[in-house]
Image (spheres, rainbow, N blue to C red):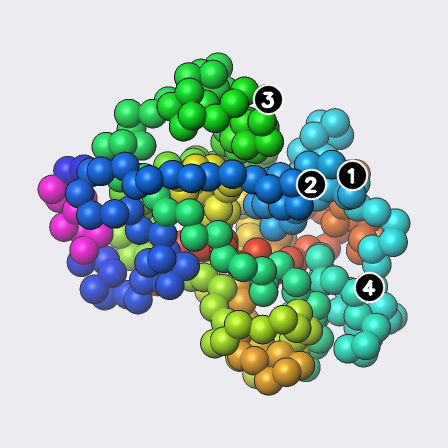
Amino acid sequence: MELCLRRFIGSLFLNIPMPKALKDILPPAGNKRPPIAWHVSASENLFHNINYTFKSEGGSKFSNYAYRDSSKEFNAPSSIEFKGKTNSLEGNQAAINETIYFFQKDLRPGKMVNLPLLITTRDETPFLPDRVAKSIPFSSDKLTGILKHFSLKPKSREADTMNETIRACERVAINGEEKFCATSFESFVDLSISKLGKKIELLSNELAKETKSPLFTIAKKVQNMGENELVCHKMKYPGAVFLCHSINKTAVYKVTLVGKDGAKAIAVAVCHKDTSSWNPKHSAFQILKVKPGTIPICHFLVRDTLVWVSN
């Protein structure tokens, strides 16, 4: 890493707090590769990123990306719907189902939400040191060599997971989207600066204490953080990898939550104001029963997601 970038990163996090979600996955000191004993258990989700869960076998699959190619979009099961009159965040705590997509008008104090993906155990897979990350290929056509590097078998669950992550990073951006994947802490910061500039702030989901209850009420403070954003999803990989993307006309909100059990949390939500280029079969339209481009669509972000915004 260039000395000027190293100095800037140091000064950046002197002026703004470094979220615990990032601090906990910093690479080890020096350029040594940390010991890696990485695996995906049979009971673990194969691909946990992009707001919803991709499952290895059975179950429903979700994607937050709005592909025009319907073959790349996964349908929501018909059993997922919101209780109440608005098909969004209405209902009582005993009845409310998982909050997936909702309308912007519902992002206000007093609304109840069910956010199981906010309380999941953090993925604390650390970044590889920058020099180590740069020395390892990161492309689908070199997957065989990558698997050998990490001593993983080609037909293993881990290999499938890595292939899915690399493919997600290689996919073509949709209309109005800019994207990149960062495989080291330095590239995570450097590429974000190149997109948003140096006056930036990093947001994350934060729980004041761990809780097993996913039921929360939106408290008094809902802060609009603007539309100059870069949402970074943590991918499944032996070293930390973030898929970061910015979609035009997307607003970021910092939301204060209070749990049913009294637990306090800060959650990050985004609202997409222009969905006209999204796949008409996108699960958001099925859940909310609206058509592309007609109304802003919002969703909360998975616990490990990080969001850069201009400050």
* Three-letter amino acid code of the residue under disc 4: Phe
Separation of disc 2 and disc 3 at Cα? 17 Å
Q: Which mark is residue 55?
A: 2
Q: Position of residue 177 (x, y in %)?
A: 53, 38
Which residue has dot 3 on it?
A: 155
Span colored in magenta: 3-10
Which mark is drawn over residue 58? 1
Q: Is 226 situated above or below 47?
A: below
Residue of label 4 = 82
Q: Does the image show residue 78?
A: yes
Amino acid marked by disc 1: Gly
Distance Cα–Cα, label 3 vs label 1 = 19 Å
**Nearer-the-camera pick, 150 or 72:** 150
Measuring 75% from the left and 30% from the top, which residue is drawn there? 70
The residue located at (50%, 76%) in the rendering is: 209
Going by the numbered disc 3, the residue's amino acid type is Lys
Residue 46: mark in rendering = none
Query: Of helix, strand and loop, which one carries label 1?
Result: loop
Mark earlier in primary sequence (2, 3): 2
